Image (cartoon, grey):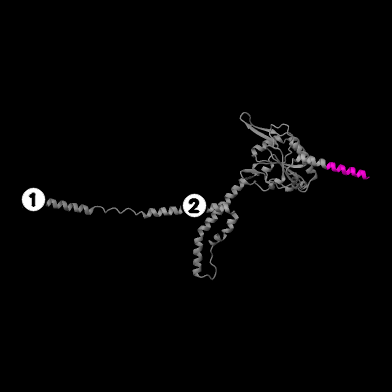
Amino acid sequence: MSLGILRSRAISLASKRFLCTNAASASPPLPPPPSAASPSRWSFLKYALVGALTGGTVFAGYASYAYSLDEIEQKTRSLRESAKYTAGDGVTALDKFQGLLYSTAMTVPAKAVELYLDARRVIEEQVKSYTEPYTDKLLPDLLPQEQHVFTLVLDLNETLIHYIWTRDTGWQTFKRPGVDAFLEHLAQFYEIVVYTDEQNMFVDPVIERLDTKHCIRYRLSRPATKYQDGKHFRDLSKLNRNPGKVLYLSGHALESCLQPENCLPIKAWQQQDIDDTALLDFIPFLEFVARSSPPDIRPVLASYQGCDIPSEFIRRSKEHQRRMQEQKNRGRFWK
């Protein structure tokens, strides 16, 4: 065999050994990609958490709608007490372990219920501050020597005044005809209170200009009203007054007051009606009530239900005078 052939075979064997050596010394293969089980577990956990939160929200919403705070607190008392397990004397180790296990299992739902009760209590207090009068006693106590005095509650807009807004003039406020004489005369007999659903920033300057002789003792504005069904109502039960001695005069009395039995409806007034005499027409009736001082004004007002009170009062007064005159003449005849 020639020398050239031997040399070529030697080179070929060396190259094969080199390739095998490189293949053996190469880095190990990469591990297989993670299986799809891990993402699926995470998805299951995520959906379970979302479902639990959704169910808890739905349950909390239903409970808030169907039950009051006190009812829920009463119904969940046993659940919350179950998380406060204490082993008594003479309890076996097994019973102690079971009680501790049950108490631990009830800790999370009990804490969730307590968190719900605290959150609902805070929310209801905030809502109440906007929907209820700011206090249960809107007026200070009457003086002992004034316990017999009646309280005349007056609405403001379309009862004592009327205000309008136009692009050219802006806001304009008009006094109802006879309002000055009405306030000045009845202030001798009544404790006069203005109770309106307007804001303080509007009420205060209007009353200052309207009541220059300070016939109005107190003024109550929107924070003193009860917000219900999208409207602000006057709640006379919060006035700190005997309800049998309170009269509410308003152009929208029956629509704006929670105590219709105390209402005196009067024709709503606008500035175009310059010949209006409704306030002055009410003076004889209101003065008679104050002087006669009935123990409860509500039955008196009920007897005028459906009538125009000033004209009906005049009719009854004339009828009473006629009967008294007849009795007087009959007495003269027998003499």
Location of the C terminus by quadrant is: top right
Task: Please give the label number shown on residue 37.
Answer: none
Is residue 329 inside the magenta stretch? yes
From the viewer's perspective, is 253 left or right of 95? Answer: right
Instruction: Name the spot of residue 169 as percent of width and height, x first.
Output: 63, 29
**In the rendered view, would you say 94 is above or below 321?**
below
As helix, strand or loop, the secondary structure at mark 2 comes to helix
What's the amino acid at mark 2? Answer: Thr
Res. 245 in view: no
From the viewer's perspective, is 83 left or right of 8? Answer: right
The residue at the point 55 percent across, 56 percent down is 114
The residue at the point 49 percent across, 52 percent down is 54
Start-end of magenta stretch: 320-335
For the residues bearing labels 2 and 1, Cβ distance under 8 angstroms: no
Q: Specify few, some or many for label 1: CA neighbours under 10 Å numbering under 14, 14-19, or 20 or more.
A: few
Q: In front: 233, or 86?
A: 233
Task: Please give the label number shown on residue 54.
Answer: 2
As helix, strand or loop, the secondary structure at mark 1 comes to helix
The residue at the point 89 percent across, 42 percent down is 329
**In the rendered view, would you say 289 is above or below 9?**
above
What's the amino acid at mark 1? Answer: Ile
Magenta span main SS = helix
Instruction: Name the spot of residue 286 as percent of width and height, x first.
Output: 77, 41
Residue for badge 1:
5
The residue at the point 23 percent across, 53 percent down is 25
**In the rendered view, would you say 41 is above or below 268?**
below
Give the distance between the C-alpha atoms of the residues marked 2 and 1, in whole angstroms: 84 Å
